[in-house]
Image (spheres, rainbow, N blue to C red):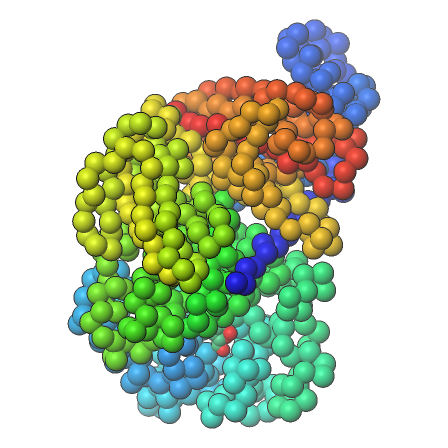
Amino acid sequence: MRRTTARRCTRCDWQAQRRTPEIAGAARRSTHRQAAAAVTRNRVMKSLLLALLMCLPLSAGAQDTTPEALRPSAHFSVYGHGAAATPPMGFNPWNAFRTEVDQARILAVAEFIEQHGLQQAGYRYINIDDGWWLKRGADGRIQIRTSMFPIATVDGGAASFRAWTDKLHAMGFKAGLYTDVGRNACSQAFDRHSPNLPIGTAAEREIGLQGFEAGDLRTMFQDWGFDYLKVDACGLADFGQGSEPVLQSGHQAVRPLIVRRDPVATDRTGVETQYARVGRLLAALNPDEDYVLAICPWGEAGVRDWGGRHGHLWRTSPDIEPTWDSMLVNLDSTVGRELYAGPGRWNDPDMLAVGLGEFDDRHLVNARSHFSLWAVLGAPLLMGFDLTQAPASLIELLSNPEVIAINQDPAGNQASVVVNQGDLQVLVKPLAASGERAVVLFNRGDTATSAQVTPAQLKLADGAPYQARDVWKHQALATQRGALQVRLAPHEAAMFKVAGAPVIGDAKLLTEMTGRIHVAVDGAPDEVSRQSTPGLVPRADLSPSGVPLRIAGQSIPYGLGALANSRFEVRLGKDFRQFSTRVGLQDGARRDAGVVFRVYGDGRLLQEVTAGAGDAQAVPVTVPVDGIDVLELVAIASPQAKAALPPAIVWGDAQLR
Ligand code: GLA
């Protein structure tokens, strides 16, 4: 069975050595005797300790060596614009029609969606994918292939999609379009024999955004009225010197910024910079915020780390194929990335393959599992087959209101994996209502098996009764106590919504609200070390290597596991009074030097403790957070630490009340 390995990528800027406001303040005070006298004993002790840990000379001119990236931002630094508060739902024609993407076919599907209850179930975006272009005109404007979209013909003027988007809007839909962040599109590399590729000279066939970003985006959003844009990346990857499209189709050669499956050769920053520009332009062009940006570099260039800073969804994997193995590969590219998703930013393991190949109506168990998994992960739900041919069984499956409600839950928490044993996986998604969770118990393999999930894994009080409802059978089970047990057929996923007493009565665990967390800095070192050290992703309730959290021999059931030299931003939105946690080094981490843990509220240092070397116990931290919008959790390894990799740390029992 194929499984992908998570690749890590955020780069810490260890060169930057600017002072934090509080350190700069301390230095200023120490140059003035009178002011220094006013510094409290606590403050002096804290400065001494900090200086010791950061190996600073205790002089007026002491420099804080905290890297810039680990200083508080006082912001929730995600994209924060647009209309993807919940995962986008709709239809994308690529896997159904590829470049034969004509107006009549898409419209027939849209009408079907409207007439068969799917629009009402939540499917709103009707997208056009690759294949709609004719060419780029001499005036630099992009032209539409009107033979496929006659609706775009304008008597005596340039073709326009305005009538198309008007039509979809009148039907109650939103309209989506496709482009590429480079100069050329994927079809020009991989569908080179299609009759519907752009025509003309090499320059006229450069229909991608690069060099034309502002004009193209204005045309698409202001003139044509689109609401959603998928921005692919083949133009940055597949048109290098000596490539087939260059040699055989005469495209201009460009140095690839993306070298597929080679993060070292890939220019991650170059790719991110281009998408960031698109994100900024779209925000400026859409003051009503009614738009969605789908970033599509197929998990390359570290997009899984930065996608949420520039857009609403980002592909975590290669294109889905309608096979069980392909679905699992794409699933694995998103599982474990629960700290990266939340309202307005979604991991995208690609479109639904339901209705195709091994997920068609003869494979309903597979199709239900695929749909359950995408739903619980908070993945976008984009149908991708010719729905006009859809049997009732698939329409019913895709419009299951209970499953869709779990996907669209407003808290936007992505399920995290609580059991990962061979072919068995259990995924739990905390829902917005207190004590409510969705759980999927999933058999990846070809033999039947038994599965269970405990109240502790559901973050419910042990021994207390809880309710469970089978959202596929639409049936409530008898009141449960103890583990919820099921028997799973090959490839089967059982899916339940459960409701009970939360494990900590009066507080909410941070890992019950991962949708409020942004991994600002993940602590992983540069690209080269990431290669040889898989599994560095910060996790909910697990260490970055995927083992349970433990400090000084004591198991810590809940908390954030990360590498030191990391910074989390948590969007409190002034909803809480107090934050508490107990911090320490994960058992097994190298303990040759201490780690400083800092908690900030809206950029102000609230508390700082150190978890020392040796067998130090967990250190408790409790701070008031009344009126605080953004909490930041920073862990900083001593520069004396000898290992190449920062030690694994734990924000144990992190909770808000
Ligand atoms: C890439 C994308 C697909 C689709 C095609 C179109 O492969 O990942 O989703 O858009 O391009 O050519």
In the image, taking residue 282 as reference, residue 225 lies left or right, namely left
> Is 602 situated above or below 527?
above
Name the image quarter holding the C terminus. top left
Query: How far across and down, in percent of the image, does residue 543 sit?
Result: 57, 39
Query: How far across and down, in percent of the image, does residue 377 sit?
Result: 40, 52
> Is 463 situated above or below 524?
above
> Is 384 situated above or below 632?
below
Query: How far across and down, in percent of the image, does residue 1 sit?
Result: 52, 63
Residue toward you, 373 or 414: 373
Q: Would you say residue 114 is visible in this rendering?
A: no
When asked about the image quadrant of residue 255, the answer is bottom right
Q: Name which residue lies at 37% across and 79% down.
A: 96
Q: Name which residue lies at 60% across and 25% down.
A: 553
Q: Name which residue lies at 54% across and 78% down.
A: 185
In the image, taking residue 272 as reference, residue 469 lies left or right, namely left
> Is 228 situated above or below 142?
above
Q: Name which residue lies at 55% across and 66% down.
A: 297
Q: Would you say residue 545 is visible in this rendering?
A: yes
Query: How far across and down, in percent of the image, does residue 25 sit?
Result: 67, 22
In the image, taking residue 48 as reference, residue 456 lies left or right, namely left
Residue toward you, 181 or 93: 93
Residue toward you, 481 or 537: 481
Q: Total label count?
A: 0
